[in-house]
Amino acid sequence: MADISIPGVSSKYNTTKLIDDLVAAEKIRLTRMEEQVESYKTAKDTWRQVNRDLGDLQRAVKSLYGFENPFAEKKASSSNERILTASADRTAPFENYSIKVKQVATADRFMTASLEKDFKVKAGTYTFQVGDESVSLRYKGGTLSDFVRRLNRKGEGLIRASSVRNTPNTQVLMIESLLTGSSNHLVFGDDSRSFALETGMLRPAVSGGAEMTLRSAAEKARSNTGEMLQAAAVTLNENSGENSGKSDVLKIAPSTSVRLPFDTSAAVEEGMILEYSYRVIEYSQADMTPPEAPGPQWPQVPQAEFSGLTVKSADNAFETPSAEQGPPPAVISNEVFSVEGNGETALLPDITQTGNEFQTVRVDASSLPGSVSSFLINNTNTYKAIEITDVRLYNPGRQDNLEPANPVSAAGDAVVEFMGIEAWRSTNTIDDLVDGITLDLKRPSRDEVEVSVEPDTEAAKDGIIRFVYAYNQLLTRILVLTGSNPEVIDELEYLEDDKRTELEEQLGSLRGDSSLNQLKNRLQGIISAPYATHLESELVLLAQMGVSTNAAAGSGGTVDFSKLRGYLEVDEEKLDNFLQTQMDAVKELFGNDTDGDMVIDSGVAQALDEYLVPYTRSGGMVSTRIARLDTQIEAKKDDISDYEDYLEDYENDLKRQYGNMEAMLNQLESSSRELDNFSKRQSGGR
């Protein structure tokens, strides 16, 4: 059976292979263009990595001499971090402070009585208020644990509830405010009020505390020994304009002791606070020196004449003693206030210098006697008067006629004594006592805590180490790109596998680029150059403070070539010493204003930054290289697209031409067969 050939589908002449071979030969140019694009992309990625390393170095050096340089960073340390911790920012003054934490800020924490383990919370609207904020929970009723979960979700950031099994068969509920301070009391509203009464969290108030009406107290005032007082010893100043809105002020003269009765005696109960405000009035010696007492006066004797003789007058032959009186001896005592009740006396906190402002003191019930009836002022100071106002005993947790039955803690302010002055704050984080210093109070203590502000040498050291790292990273990149020695990579023992592979692929890829070698040489020159500081020759080089290249020979006279490549190394001991003793000079070495125009014009970091700008800025050397490669990539892609169109047309032309050729050959073969057949028929007919 003769072979059947269908043009375009099969070919006995194997034209398909011929066409493929011809097209493949033409595609060699396309492959070369695609490889060129990939090489452009690789070069672009390489320059982008160089640009990234340059940017890292520039950012590192900018941070060493710019406005936020680490040499101006400060740190605060506390002598007892169990009492308070401290932190400082750049505005804090270098100083040592003595701070006493008298009281930490607390929040209301109320607990119920023991409840049955299957206790159910009734349906209702449970409202809780803390300070000016409130939260309401519409509850459908359920178990105590479910109520706790829903209340915590609703009151997040304001209140917190928790239930604890205090015995195998009972549980207690505690609700606490998350805001500290005496102005943030936990108040129960709507159905939460009846719930608190039902569970024993609140109870009817037993005692209303005790108030002191100063007018009445002044009229009844006696000395601590019960004697009458002189009129000037205790004076009442009503509605004083100096009193900042307080109603009455009682002034106790120097060297005066007085007992002031409360309006009524009151029992002291858990949760109560004794509150009073006072101000110290300072006097000078001149204010307290008595006037000169009158002394004997000798009359003037006139001269006399007798029998022609004149007898002249003369001064007394002896001096009279001076009647001038000196100031009283100074008596200084800070133990001025105490409170009395049922024969018991409790000493109250010492007075401190108050300036022109009244200082409010709050004393917890645990520091008071079982009851109070009188407020005692024993002002033995000779040059200080005491003004007092707003004396009262009260329960801050009391709500109308209710009070906490089981208070775990009561809302109160933090109290610290600083430079002899008491400061009150609503939170345990205090950032406005000293500019730039933040205190975090942990617990009260009778002992003072020393807070010291000093330079943050660790921040400065970290900044220098980041600079050294960025410099070495850039130097490594340049050495790999411009050289062909694989030992440069092998010496870097810290490299991870993927980073090592990346560098191996880039080795020598920019060997002929002179700009990178020029960059390396200039950077090394800047690093090793001297820069002026106020220490003059003692510190003008990075090497003098422990940052240098290490080109020392190894043992046995061999040379460690890794030490000769220009990498920076840090002598931490030497660097630490300079940072601790000569921080200003180290700062000047990296960036210094030498002409007083408020512009940094000298220093290692300044010089490096200035030199790197033409490389890293928009339109700079590196970005221009990258842009040029982008242009080449796009142009080559256009060439590839055009050539792909050409190859498609070329292949179609070949298929058409070979198809026509096959058709003609097939036609010739058909004609040849017909002639053969015709000849055979003619021969057979003879």
Image (cartoon, rainbow, N blue to C red):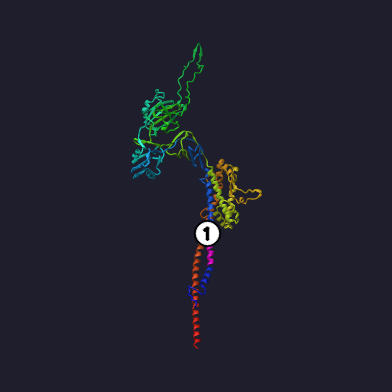
Of residue 328 and residue 44, the one placed in the foreground of this image is 44
The residue furthest top is 307
The residue furthest bottom is 686
Q: Is residue 104 visible?
A: yes
The spot of residue 252 in percent (x, y) is 41, 27
| Residue picked out by circle 1 | 41
Secondary structure of residue under mark 1: helix
Q: Residue at x 60, y 42 (%)?
A: 538
The residue furthest right is 556
The magenta stretch spans residue 161: no
Q: Main secondary structure of the magenta part?
A: helix
Q: Is residue 172 visible?
A: no
Of residue 139 and residue 666, the one placed in the foreground of this image is 139
Q: Relative to residue 250, is residue 649 depicted above or below?
A: below
Q: Dot 1: within a 10 Å radius of its alpha carbon, few (fewer than 14), some, or many (20 or more) residues?
A: some
The spot of residue 349 in percent (x, y) is 44, 31
The residue furthest front is 168
Query: In the picture provided, is 563 more to the left or to the right than 141?
Result: right
The spot of residue 120 in percent (x, y) is 35, 42
Q: Residue at x 45, y 20 (%)?
A: 294
Query: In the picture provided, is 582 more to the left or to the right than 202?
Result: right
Query: In the picture provided, is 156 more to the left or to the right than 44?
Result: left
The quadrant in which residue 430 appears is top left
Amino acid under label 1? Answer: Lys
Q: Relative to residue 230, is residue 394 depicted above or below?
A: below
Of residue 384 and residue 392, the one placed in the foreground of this image is 392
The spot of residue 642 in percent (x, y) is 49, 66
Of residue 412 and residue 95, the one placed in the foreground of this image is 412
* Magenta range: 27-43
Q: Relative to residue 445, is residue 73 depicted above or below?
A: below
